Image: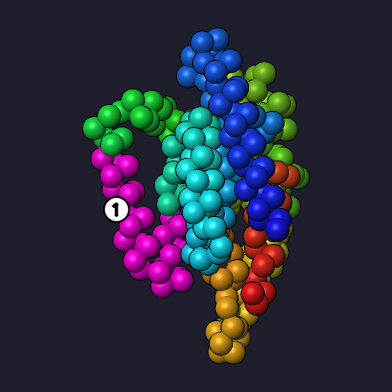
């Protein structure tokens, strides 16, 4: 039921983003919709998670599964309006892993076919991806963030500087160092953990995640041996893999809105349906 509520919330957010774009497109060239989120990337992550939930529902062959095709397509509009380029790739990785882990190779071939057609459309008609020409500057900004994060990690490598360190450091040092790129987080899970919590905190987080993954595999194998369904475990694994991939370039899953969706999905590990 709660997954359906999240899907409904995604539709409402997308509908609002359409209204937002109509108002702002002429006032701010290249505007990216944020809705009620901190910035456009957070909104993009939320609607991408809704699309992953729809894929999970389709794979499960739930009743009225065609509704989830519509919800996914509608939320894809929200993803477009968020202006995030990388989230399309991350969403595709999550869906591909979900289909592979569920051995749904027929649906996988259909999805890959659609993905190839979409890629060709973007290449042949660049207007469908207006921010593609910003790939170079965006990458350069990421590198600036990472280099500053590494510099500050060296200053406090053991225990770090506390949560949201990048934002606080930017606010403190940017008046005298204008070359520092403005951001709330370090745009990389590992760098952000090291910057905020140091090697000690990052090691503890790593140990906890290792224990969780080990238990997830144990739950999966137990359900499989008992002949029970394990859609939830597979869905959580695909979601975690997508989050890990996105964590290489951004950390927008570490937030109240997006983080709660992720935690709710992962909490289904080991649940028999």
- Quadrant that contains the C terminus: bottom right
- Res. 264 image quadrant: bottom right
Residue in the image at 30% along x and 28% along y: 126
- Quadrant that contains the N terminus: bottom right
Q: Which residue lies furthest to the bottom in this view?
A: 226
Residue in the image at 33% along x and 49% along y: 114
Residue in the image at 55% along x and 84% along y: 224
Residue under circle 1?
Answer: 113
What are the residue bounds of the magenta stretch?
Answer: 93-120
- Res. 119 image quadrant: top left
- Res. 256 image quadrant: top right
109 on left or right of 155: left
Which secondary structure dominates the residues rendered in magenta?
helix
Residue 125 drawn at (x, y percent)? 27, 29
Disc 1 crowd rating (10 Å Cα; few below 14, some 14-19, many 20+) is: few
> 22 above or below 45?
above
> 12 above or below 234?
above
Per the image, is 102 magenta?
yes
Q: Residue furthest front?
A: 64
Q: Is residue 16 visible?
A: yes
59 on left or right of 129: right
> 129 above or below 89?
above
> 266 above or below 54?
below
Q: How many marks?
A: 1
Query: Is 253 in front, or is 34?
Result: 34
């Amino acid at each position: 039921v709660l997954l359906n509520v999240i899907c409904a919330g995604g539709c409402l957010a997308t509908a609002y983003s359409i209204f937002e774009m109509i108002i702002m497109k002429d006032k701010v060239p290249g505007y990216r919709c944020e809705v009620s989120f901190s910035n456009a990337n957070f909104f993009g992550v939320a609607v991408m998670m809704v699309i992953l939930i729809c894929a999970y529902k389709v794979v499960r062959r739930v009743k009225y599964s065609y509704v989830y095709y519509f919800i996914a397509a509608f939320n894809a509009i929200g993803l477009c309006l968020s202006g995030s380029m990388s989230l399309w790739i991350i969403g595709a990785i999550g869906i591909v892993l979900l289909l592979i882990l569920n051995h749904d190779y027929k649906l996988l071939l259909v999805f890959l076919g659609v993905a190839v057609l979409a890629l060709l459309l973007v290449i042949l008609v660049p207007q469908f991806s207006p921010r593609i020409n910003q790939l170079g500057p965006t990458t350069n900004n990421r590198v600036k963030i990472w280099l500053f994060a590494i510099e500050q990690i060296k200053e406090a490598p053991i225990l770090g500087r506390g949560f949201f360190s990048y934002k606080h450091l930017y606010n403190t040092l940017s008046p005298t160092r204008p070359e520092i790129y403005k951001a709330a987080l370090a745009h990389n899970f590992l760098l952000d953990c090291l910057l905020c919590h140091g090697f000690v905190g990052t090691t503890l987080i790593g140990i906890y995640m290792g224990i969780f993954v080990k238990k997830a595999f144990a739950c999966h194998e137990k359900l499989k041996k008992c002949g029970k369904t394990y859609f939830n475990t597979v869905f959580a694994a695909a979601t975690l893999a997508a989050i890990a991939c996105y964590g290489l370039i951004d950390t927008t899953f570490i937030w109240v809105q997006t983080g709660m969706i992720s935690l709710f999905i992962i909490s289904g590990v080991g649940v028999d349906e």
